[in-house]
Image (tube, grey):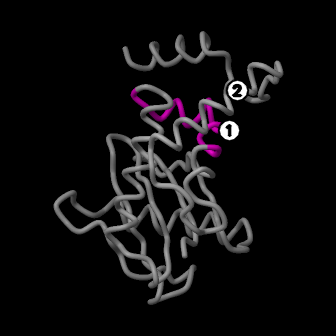
Amino acid sequence: MIKSIMIFNNHGKPRLSKFYQQIDIATQQALIEEIFSLVSKRPDTVCNFLEGSKLLGGKDTRVIYRHYATLYFVFVVDESESELGILDLIQVFVESLDRCFENVCELDLIFHFEEVHHILTEIVQGGMVLETNMTEIVTAIGELNKMKKKSGAISTGSLSLKASETLRSSFRH
């Protein structure tokens, strides 16, 4: 079972955290700091699996991660999950984000956090993998976006597309 999913940048700032078991906020923060300190110190040439997190289950817990550009994608799982399967799942998640945002970057995760959570929910719910087909995931998100536009729903906390593009282009230069 997947215990948690986290995305943080090279400086340890969380951009997404989803826990599939009851954990208080202070422990969540300590866990994010612990995992960041573990994965950020590892060279790119070593394995992407770590055994155990003292805060989240001990030896029967695995930390599986991938580092893409400025972001770490981390899945904390129990021993019943396949490490290689989870690495593939991380790849599916990243490629789904990339298809939905066209060259996803850290700013997309910040300004479109609701859509990122929807994409994650299409893939994983309750710590169980639901979907791994990227076409199905992207289609479901496209349908959700169509329904939002049709109903005139405006998501609070999200910037308009034009404002997001302006910010994105200013950060790239």
Is residue 54 rendered magenta in the image?
Answer: no
Classify residue 113 as left or right of residue 150.
left
Q: Secondary structure at mark 2?
A: loop
Please tell me which residue is depicted at 73% across the width and 74% down the height of the picture.
22
Question: Measuring 49% from the left and 19% from the top, which residue is drawn there?
Answer: 168
Residue at (59% x, 41% y) in the render:
116
Q: CA distance from mark 2 to mark 1?
A: 8 Å
Mark 2 residue type: Ser
Q: Residue furthest bottom?
A: 59
**Residue 158, label in figure:** 2
User: Nearest the camera: 118 or 10?
Assistant: 118
Residue 111 percent coordinates (x, y):
62, 29
Horizontally, is 95 left or right of 126 in the view? left
Nearer to us in this view, 106 or 143: 143
The total of numbered circles placed on residues is: 2
Q: Which residue is mark 1?
A: 114
Whole-percent x and y of residue 45?
16, 61
Quadrant containing the C terminus is top left
Name the quadrant of the N terminus: bottom right
Going 49% across and 28% down the picture, which residue do you hit?
A: 101
Reply above or below: 111 against 41: above
- Label 1 residue SS: helix
Q: Could you tell me the amino acid type at mark 1?
A: Glu
Image quadrant assignment for residue 95:
top left
Q: Position of residue 93 (x, y in %)?
A: 45, 48
Contact between labelled residues 1 and 2, with CB atoms less than 8 Å apart: yes
Q: Residues within 10 Å of mark 2 (few under 14, many from 20)?
A: some
Who comes first in sequence, dot 2 or dot 1? 1
- Badge 1 crowding class, 10 Å Cα cut-off, few under 14, some 14 to 19, many 20 or more, is some
Quarter assignment of residue 102: top left
The magenta span reads 103-118
